Amino acid sequence: MRESPWGPIAIADAHAHFFSHAFFSALVAQNPDLTLDAAGAMLGWTMPPEDPVRLAEEWVKELDRQRVARAALMASIAGDEASVIAASAAFPKRFFAFAMVNPKAWQARTFENIRAACLFPAMHGYSVQDDAARAVFDWAQTRRRVVFVHCGVLSVGVRAKLGLPSPFDMRFSNPIDLHAVALRYPSVPIVVPHFGAGYFREALMLADLCPNVYLDTASSNRWVRYLEPHHLQSRVDLRRVFRQALDVVGPSRLLFGTDSSYFPRGWHDAIFEQQARALYELGLTAPDARAIFGENLMRILASEDLL
């Protein structure tokens, strides 16, 4: 249990990246002049061990230190699902396995032990309404799984720091594209991270019309810069974002996340503190805080053992 403005609270982080050895190996392979050691030096990060279970052990120690009960660990490059499967198998009471998938190369059998398939349409260049993406939603419906769909601005900081190109296509980033899909799969929980990452209004419209759509709160949410002209930026803060989201979708469809990813930073506790403070200042009740910071995630993942 972690201390919060509402007292001790059980935290389940809905959005953390598992930057595995395989993840970094795939990145450095895109630049023949890079090695893992060189990448670590450029980033100032600790390169992970080859065995994903050892990295999972580091995450367990970090979550213990931060008093975080559980975390959804996302394999952050397509094809690395084995890393998070190994981590969650080693620590099933601490981690949920999420994995990025490119539906153009979708193989459902490799996702047998994955709790959420994560789609990045702008990264892989497809519409979420394409037949290839439909196969992922079919899988989620049959297996009672979750689909995470990244919308809005997509910026992968590690790629920029390593000098790797990011040829993403924002034509495929609008949450409105999910409307017909969400209606077609009403039993599938669909998570739109970062409040839509700049498409806040569209994400709220989608969630208002589709009760199976959830918004995650992950990261510093720098996209709020886009909500007003620059000279009025001081009027926009996280409290306004939360207030509007609560007004439209209520506390039962918001999922707390940090967007944590690398060591030595570890779990991004400043994100928790910032979001908890904003919600407390809005007058959020303790039961609603428990829902947002952990219980909602547990419910949509149909976890058999509650926090």
Image: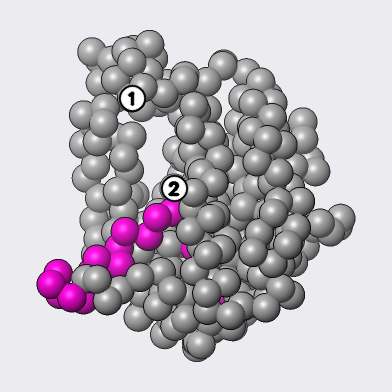
Q: Is residue 32 above or below residue 181?
A: above
Kindly identify which numbered label has been placed on residue 102: 2
Q: Residue at x 30, y 63 (%)?
A: 223
Residue 105 spot, x, y in % from top left: 46, 44
Q: Residue at x 51, y 87 (%)?
A: 247
Q: Are marks 1 and 2 in contact (CB under 8 Å)?
A: no
The residue that disc 1 covers is: 43
Residue 163 spot, x, y in % from top left: 21, 29
Tell whether 176 sits left or right of 215: left
Residue 217 spot, x, y in % from top left: 49, 63
Amino acid on which the number 2 mark rests in the picture: Asn
Residue range corresponding to the magenta coloring: 213-232
The one nearer the camera, 83 or 227, is 227
* Residue 223 belongs to magenta span: yes
Quadrant where the C terminus sits is bottom right
Amino acid on which the number 1 mark rests in the picture: Leu
First of labels 1, 2 by sequence position: 1
Res 126 quadrant in image: bottom left
The one nearer the camera, 116 or 6, is 6
Residue 278 spot, x, y in % from top left: 49, 69
